[in-house]
Every structure is written in structure tokens, then in C-alpha cells.
Amino acid sequence: MTSLRVRLLLGMVTAIVFLLGVFALTVYTSIRRSLLRELDASLATMAQTLLNYVENRGDRIRADVNEADLPELHRASRTYYFQFLLPDGTELVRSRSLEGYPLLPEFHGPAESPEFQSMTLPNGRPGRAVGLEFRPPPEARSRSRAPRAATKPATRPHVAPATRPAAGPGTKKNLAAAGKAKADPAERSGEGKVRKGETKDKKADPSKKVEPHKKPRPPRPQTVTLVAALDIGDLEDHLAWIRWMLAGAGGGIVLLSLGLAGLVVRQGLRPVNHLAGQIADVDEEDLAMRLDVDDLPRELLPVGECLNGLLGRLEAAFARQRCFTADVAHELRTPLAGMRSTLEVALSRARKSEDYREALDDCLAISTRMHAMVDSLLMLARLESGQLAFQMQDIALEELVEECWLPLADKARDRGLSFENRLGGQFTCVSDRRMLSLVMRNLLDNAVEYADAGGRIWIDARYAESVGSDCQPAGRRLVFRVANTGCRLEAADTERVFERMWRGDASRSGAGEHAGLGLALVRRAAVALGGWASADIAEAVFTVTLDLPAEHPPHGDDDRLEDEAHRDDPTGAAEPCISEMAQPRLLSQSGRPVQS
Amino acid sequence: MRVLLIEDYPPLQKALARGLREEGFAVDATGDGNEGLWYATGNDYDVIVLDLMLPGLDGLSLLRKLRAAGKQTHVLILTARDTLADRVKGLDLGADDYLVKPFAFEELLARVRALVRRKYQGKNPCIEIDALRIDTAARRVFLGDEEVRLTAREYALLEYLARRSGQTVSRSEIWEHVYDFQSSASSNVVDVYIGYLRKKLHRDDHSVLIHTIRGMGYMLGGQQ
């Protein structure tokens, strides 16, 4: 899922549904439990009342229940059921409500801790029943017992043992309270099951009281089981209503929260939309625009700042590109103007053929210069777009220098320059011959052009060992230097000399052939060849240092040049094209990658 | 009319100097900013044609220094920079006109002529003195209905005298505005050319007089 909004919405609603479910379940369970506890208390009271009618006549047990005499039963709004059974299953008595119906299911706990059960009554209605086994004490007194007789607890055990002093025998209230107290453990352990420890305590208490009555025990002591039940149809209806209420309220809340969460999410995502709107407003024509990050929430701040950084870099790159285009236009306009004026003046009147020849010679010289410049620009463009394929081979440096110096020797002599070869030995490097000789020609040409008249030019070289770093792959390097005297640049210009169309003196457009492309070419070519070019200016001596690999890269180390090409300009002064440059592949003559 | 050409690209300088000279201008040309400033402050040029990218001293700085030195010479900026900001900056620094490279040589000539006219407070390209009529755009001279054929130097001399008609013009002024440093002229060359002009402008019915003001110079037209 890609929609942040839908994801947030679903997450929130799922959490709300879950929490609501847990809440509703808890509420429902506790309501049900408390209702049942109340019910169990009245069941216990009812059982207690009924027990008063059980008599032990010594030989047999009797239970004469006159339901009309039982106001407690009538007071309860529920239909009641009860039955007394002897252990052998013989029915002693049953309630009138059970007449014509099968008996209630038989179950019981001890009198001290009766068992409570939910069940389906014989008439099919839901019911709650209490079952207990009771050993009626031998009785010789009058059997005309009103329920109030039950207020003599010393003679009979309570259905609910009096574990608390406050729940002492006496009144019906006390009985009810006792019943409630009795029901407590049942409630706690759920559905009438009593914890063992409590049962023991409770057993111990009444047994003491019962003990004295056991002495006149008849030879065949008997017990009776009582199962009394109440119709809880109304309670079930009530619970069902609560269930529906909870479900309805829950559903309503979920729907409501869905709407609210939607609003909240939309509100919460507004900064994202705002940011998107700002980004949409970014125009490639006007990259000076920046996103307003002041109002961005903390989570979006990095996004905004990164985008602003990107815009800044793009703007700088575009500005450099525009500047470069303007420079190119400028550099081409001047020779064009020269050519046009020469031709127009030549044609303005009839002339001698020598004059025409002179004008044509001038135009040829101009076009040659423009040609060279366009070639340099093209080479730069190719280096930057990585369209060049190199044939890497071992190249003897001395031979290459001689080859490149020859065309410049005359010009150097005319300017009275001295050329010193301080190589003093055989040096080789691994490079592309054509590209390296282009680099060498540019370096020497630059030196001849900018050395002061009568100055000196010298070259030297050494090997260096590179341990390998981010900037430089490991291996033997050739460090080659070309230096000339008469430099008028400042030390601060050392990086700028590698910029395209840059010339030390802005007004020095140079009568010369230089359009400020030579060193820019050198830097890019060096990078493409897996090396680096740097400049140094000290005491009017301008030195360019060329760092080139002196040995073939280890087998399979194809990424080496890539690293080199993507190395960032340490000063950041050069154009970004260096890092953006797609790397020319090392190709053999057959067009396959070179295997060393 | 004397023009200072400051342009560092040799082929262009060469072509422009040649073209301007052929049009009768006295041209001094240099490719260096400092040298150009030295020429411009030391002489009274009618027009300076100035490139902006110059070695030594760039064109805009040169212009600033020239104006700071109080020189009112008309300056035509010649440059490859064509952005609005460049043009505005050049004109604001005191240039009188602006021409972007590459340009048509005819346009340069026309603009230089216009600047010359402005220098001598004339908007009309035709100068008329009595029966003499000089079409400065076409560089043709008429006396009555008849055209007078003049050499480039003679024309330059006549045009300068005509532009300052009614005023006494000294020999050195003539020298300064009609001859450039390349001219290998002897000291009496002005007198010689005045003689040529007088001869060519003489007609029986209506002649134009070039008066000699003794000890001071010459005057075309007007009353002695």
C-alpha cells in the first residue's frame, strides 16, 4: 500500500476497534458477573429458607414445604423451582412449578459451599440453580416452623457459612448477607467453583457447630439434596440488550472515529501536501527559489533541507552551464567579428590581388583558431559525457614529451624560452597514447604561452607508491610535473585555472590561441585516464602536476577508474561534470575490456 | 576625423583600422588597455572604439578612468558580451554607443559618423556653407550642382574645417584630427593640403574661401 493516508487511517481504526472490543467485553463480563452474583445471593437465601423445612425424624427425612408460607419466594419476581431428593434419587418434594415437568438436573455441593449452575430449565427457559447436600440434624421439636425459625442458626448450618462476625445469624438480612458472602468465592472463581483453602476453613467452622448435634445421630444417618432454580429469562434479556447496546455504541464509535481519524490524518498530512505544492512550483527556469522549511514539521525538515540542497547544487550547475555557454559564445564571436570585418573591408572597394590574398590569409588564420577551439570544446564535451574509448598501454614518457615538444620548439625559441628536460631516466605510465599526448601538448603549450619572455620551462617526473584511498587507487603512480617561470597568477587561482574559459586576467583575452580551455581539458582527461591534475603557484613559477597510474590495474579491478572519475573535486571549484561524468570504458582494440 | 581603436584581437584590429582609414578617418590602433588609456588621455580624438576584454586594463576600467580624467571623447563600445546588464553597465559608465560582435562594418562606420556629428553639435549629415554642400554620409562634396572629387585626406581636412566653419582652426588641431601617428607627414603638409583644397574649390562664379588667419590657422566660410 502506498497511500500514507490510507495506511494511517487503517492503523488508527484498527487500534480503535481493538480497544473498543476489549472495553466492551470487559464491561459486559463485569455486568454479567455482578448480575449473577446478585442472583446467586438470592438463590442462596432461597435455599436457606427451604432447608428450614427439612426435618430429620430419625428414621426418615421429611420436607414439608408449604409454598404459600414462603414470602421470600414470592417476593422474588422470578419463577422459582426446587426439589428435594434423597441420595438414592427418591423425590422428597418438588415445587409446584415443576409439576408436570421432569426434575431439574441433579448436582450439588456441600451445604457449606453449594454449587451454582446456569442451566436450561425443564420448560426450556434459561435458569440459574443452586445445588447442595444437606444433612438435617435430628429434630424432635415442633415441626410448625415458620421461616423465622431459620433464625436459630445454632441448630442448623447455614447455607452460607458465617465467616465474618458481622454476618452473624439473626435476621433475614443477615441471612441474605451471609448468602452474598457465600457467593463471593463462587463469583471469584467463576460459576460456583470454590477454592480449596476457603472450603476447608468454611467446613471446619460449621462442623464444630454441628458436632454436638451429631451425638444423637441415628443409626442410619441420611442426607438430602436440594436443587433450587430461578428463571433468569429476564436477566438474559437484559444481558442481550446490553450486548446490543455495546455493539451498537461500538459500531457508532468506530464509524465516528473513522470520520474523525480521516480529518485528523488529512490535517496531519497537510504539511506534506504543502511541501508537494512548493516542490511543484519549482521551475527549471528559476532555480533560485527555495522551499520554505521554517514551518515544516520536524519529520519533514530533512526532506525539505535535502531538496533545498539539491536545488542549490542544481542552480549552481545551471549557472555554470549558462556561464560556460555565454563564454563559448563570446569566444566564438570575437573571431567571427574579425573574419566578417576583414572580408567586408576587403570587399568594400576594388583592390590589388595581394590585398585580397592578405585578407584571405587572415580569414584562414581566424578559422584555424576557431577550429582548434571547437575541437577543444568537443573533446571536453566527449570527456564529460564519457563517449571516449581508451586503449590503455605502456607509454614511455620521454618519447612522448619529445614528440609533443617538437611543434612548440620554434615558438619557444622565438620567445627566447629555455626548455629543460629533468626527467633523467626512463619513466613509463599506463595510459591512452592519443589522450595523453593531447594532455602533454596542452601542458607544454600552456607553459610556452604564459612563460615570461626569456623565461624557463622544465619538466620532471618521479614514481610514487599509493597505498590507496578514496581519492587514489593503490599501486605505483607516475607523478609528472611541468613548470614555467613568469606566472602572474595568485596562489588563490590554483584551482580556477582548471575551470573552462577561465583566464588569469579577465581582460587578458589573449592575442594568443588560448581560449582558457587547455587546462580544463588537461584536468578532465587526467581524470578520465585514472589520474589527477593539480596546479601550484609559488614565486612566479607555475607548476602543473599530473598524477597517472604507472602500472596496469589488478585483474578484474574494473571499478578503479570509476572511483577515480567520481572523485569529488576537493575544492568544489571545478564544474560538477567531473563527478557526473559517465566513465569511459577501458577498451582494447577489439572493443573488449582490457585484460591486464 | 580621428579615431582611437582599442581592440586586442589582431585580425579584427587590423581589418577595422584599415577600413576606417580607407573611409578617411585618421586611426590610431592599440591592443592594450593601458596603452589605449594613454593614447586617449594624451590626444583629442573624435571617437574611441573600445573593446571590453583587454589585456592590461579592461575596457570598462579604461572608460571609468577616462571619464574621471575629464575627457569628453565619444566612446563606442565594441564587445562580444551582449547581455542587457553588460550593455547597461557600459552605457552607464559613460559610453555613448554599444555594438555587439560580430557586426557589419557598415554599421560601425555609420555609428562612428553619428558620434562625430554629435561631437560637432550637428544632426544633419549634410553640411552647407554658401555654395558648398558636404554629404558626410556618402562622403561626397558638391559646389553648386557640380561634384568635387577629393582624395580621402582632402575630404577629411575639408570635413573637419566645415564642421568647425566660422571658427579659427589651428594647424595643430588640424594635425590632430586629420592625421594619425602612422602618417609620415612633414610639418607643412597641412599647408600643402589647404592649397590643394583651395584649388579644387575654386570656381569662377562661386568659390568658397578658406581664409588664412595669420599666426593662428585657417577658417572656412564666415567673415574674416
Image (cartoon, coloured by chain):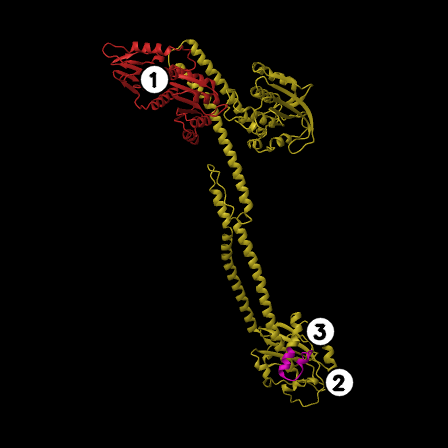
Chain colours: A yellow, B red
User: Taking the image as drawn, is residue B102 in sight?
Assistant: no
Amino acid type shown at disc 1: Val
Q: Is residue A403 visible?
A: yes
Instruction: Give the percent coordinates (x, y) of residue B94.
Output: 41, 28
Q: Which mark is residue A198?
A: 3
Seen as rendered, the residue at the extreme front is B215
Label 3: state its secondary structure.
helix
Residue positioned most to the left: B205
- Dot 3: chain letter: A
Query: Does residue B149 belong to the magenta stretch?
Result: no
Q: What segment is highlighted magenta in the picture? A: A159-179
Chain label for disc 1: B
Compared with B28, A494 (above or below) is below
A403 with respect to A352 (left or right): right
Residue at numbered disc 2: A212
Give the labeled residue for mark 1.
Answer: B169
Relative to the observer, which residue lies in front, A421 or A309?
A421
Q: CA distance from mark 2 to mark 3?
A: 23 Å
Circles 2 and 3, Cβ within 8 Å, touching? The answer is: no
Q: Quadrant of the C terminus of chain A?
A: top right
- For image coordinates 52% across by 66% down, the residue present is A245
User: Residue B69: x, y in percent?
Assistant: 43, 26
Vertical placement of A376 versus A257: above or below?
A: above
Q: Amino acid at mark 3?
A: Glu
Q: Nearer the viewer, mark 2 or mark 3?
A: 3
